[in-house]
Amino acid sequence: MATVREQKEPNHLKWLQAALEEGASDRVRDILADLHPADIASLLESIPPEQRPLVWGQVDSRLIGEILLELPETVRADLVKLMDDKALVAAARTLDTDDIADLIPELPDEVIAEVLFALDKQDRQRLDAVLSYPEDTAGGLMNVDAVTVRENITLEVVLRYLRRRGELPESTDKLFVVDRNDHLLGTLTISKLLTSDTAMRVSQIVDHDGVKFTALTPAKEVAAAFERYNLISAPVVDEANRLLGRITVDDVVDVIREEADHSVMAPAGLSEEVDIFAPVARSSRDRAVWLGVNLVTAVIASWVIGLFEQTIEKVVALAVLMPIVASMGGNAGIQTLTLVVRGLSLGTITDSNARRLLAKELMVSGLNGLLWALLVALVAMLWYNNFMLALLIALAMVINLAFAALSGVTIPILVRKLGIDPALASGVILTTVTDVVGFFAFLGLAALFLV
C-alpha cells in the first residue's frame, strides 16, 4: 500500500517521459517550470542522453548554473558541450564564488577567461583564493562570504551593521570576530547576539574555543567534525590564523553524499560520477579494466585448482565441496574488510589500535570457523559417509577463515599506506587471497591424506 507521501508526490519523471515521447516541448517546459534545480538535475540524469538536449533547451536560463552543479561530472560535461560561450558565462555569473570554482574545471579555456573578466576585482580575488586549494580540502570547500566584526564594539553596533547589510549569506548561524589584520579571535552566534544586552561588547560574549579548520584540512575530516559537533558553519583559517572563509553545512552534505556513493561504487570499480544512461561503448570501456582485473584473479584461483587436478579426478567429492570453503572465507573476509574500510574512512582505526582490532577479528574468525566447520563437516559426513573428507573440509574452513580475518584487516591498511583507495582495491585482493588459500588448503590436505 502506497504511503501518504507517495500518493501526494507527483511523478515528474513519468510525465516528462510521456511529453518527450509525444515531442511536446511546451509540456516539457511546464513540467520543469516549478521544479527546484536539484529536481531538474535528477530528471536529466534519469533520462537517456539522446533526450537530454530537448529537455535542456526548455530549462529556465536563470537556473542553468545551479543545475549544472547538481549533475554528475559526466552528465554535466555532455550538457556543457551543448551550450555556447555566452550562455556558459551567463550561467556562471548567477553562481556564488565557491560554486563558480566547482564549475570552472568543466569549462573551456575561452569561457573561463570570459567568466574571470566578467567578475569584479573583489570576486576575482575570492575565486583565486578558493581555486588555490585542492577541492577535497577545507579551502576548496569554503565560501568567502564570511561576515566579520571586531571585538571592541557593542552589540548595538553589530545589529545596526547587519541591518544596513540588508541580508545575510545562507546558513549564517554565527559571525566571525577578527582583529585589524583579519586574525580570527572567535565566533559570535546569532542566538547570543539576539538574546544579549545590546550595551554589551562583542568581547564579553565571544566564543574563543569554537571549531575551526586550516585550509588544507581534508574534506573527510571536515565532514566528520560537522557531524560530531552538529555544526552549521565553521571558519577556515590559514597557517597564521587569518580568516579565509567559512564552510557551511550544505557543502558538507555534498561531501558526505559523495563519500556514501563512493563506498557503494568503488568496490565494483565504478566512479560515483558514472552516468547510468551513458552510451554502451562508454560504459563498456569504463567497466572493461575492472573486469580484466577480476579475470586475472580468477585465472590465479583456477591455476591453484589445476595444481591438484589429479587429486580431484580421484576424489570427485572435492570438486563439489571446495567452493564452500572459498565462499565462506570470502564472505567472512568481506565482513571484516567492510568494517575496516569504514573505520579508516572515519578515522576510528589508526596504527595505534590496528593490532588490537586484528587480534579481535582473529578470535571472531576462530569462533565462527569452529562453529561452521563442524556444521559443514557434519553435512559432508552425511553426504559422502567419509570421516576423513569431513575432517579435512573442517580444517580447511578454519584455516581460510583465519586468513580471511588477517587479510580483511591488513590489506586495506597496507593499500592505504601505498596511496591507493582501500575501498577500490581491497575487495579484489581479498577475494583472490580467500579463493587461493581456500582451494590450496582443502585440496592440499586432500592430496596429503586422501590420495
Image (spheres, grey):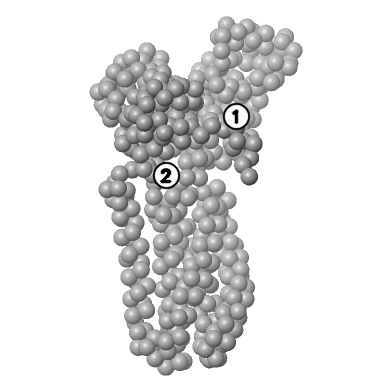
Direction front: furthest residue: 22
Nearer-the-camera pick, 94 or 407: 94
Image coordinates for residue 257, horizontal then vertical, percent: 50, 40
Image coordinates for residue 50, horizontal then vertical, percent: 31, 36
Q: Which residue is mark 2?
A: 272
Q: Secondary structure at mark 2?
A: loop
Residue 351 appears in the rendering: no
Quarter containing the C terminus: bottom left
Mark 1 crowd level (few <14, some 14–19, many ≥20, 10 Å Cα): some
Nearer-the-camera pick, 193 or 171: 171
Instruction: Report how far apart the C-alphas of labels 1 and 2 lie in the structure.
Output: 26 Å
Picture disc at residue 374:
none
Quarter containing the N terminus: top right
Q: Is residue 74 left or right of residue 96?
A: left
Mark 2 crowd level (few <14, some 14–19, many ≥20, 10 Å Cα): some
Residue 331 appears in the rendering: yes
- Earlier-in-chain disc, 1 versus 2: 1
Image coordinates for residue 80, horizontal then vertical, percent: 31, 29
Nearer-the-camera pick, 2 or 177: 2
Which residue: 35% across, 33% down? 52
Indicate the amino acid at tag 2. Answer: Glu
Direction left: furthest residue: 110
Q: How many marks?
A: 2
Q: Secondary structure at mark 1?
A: loop
Which residue: 60% across, 79% down? 375
Which residue: 39% across, 37% down? 47
Picture disc at residue 232:
1
Which residue: 27% across, 21% down? 85
- Against 389, residue 199 (above or below) is above
- Against 6, residue 119 (above or below) is above
Indicate the amino acid at tag 1. Answer: Ile
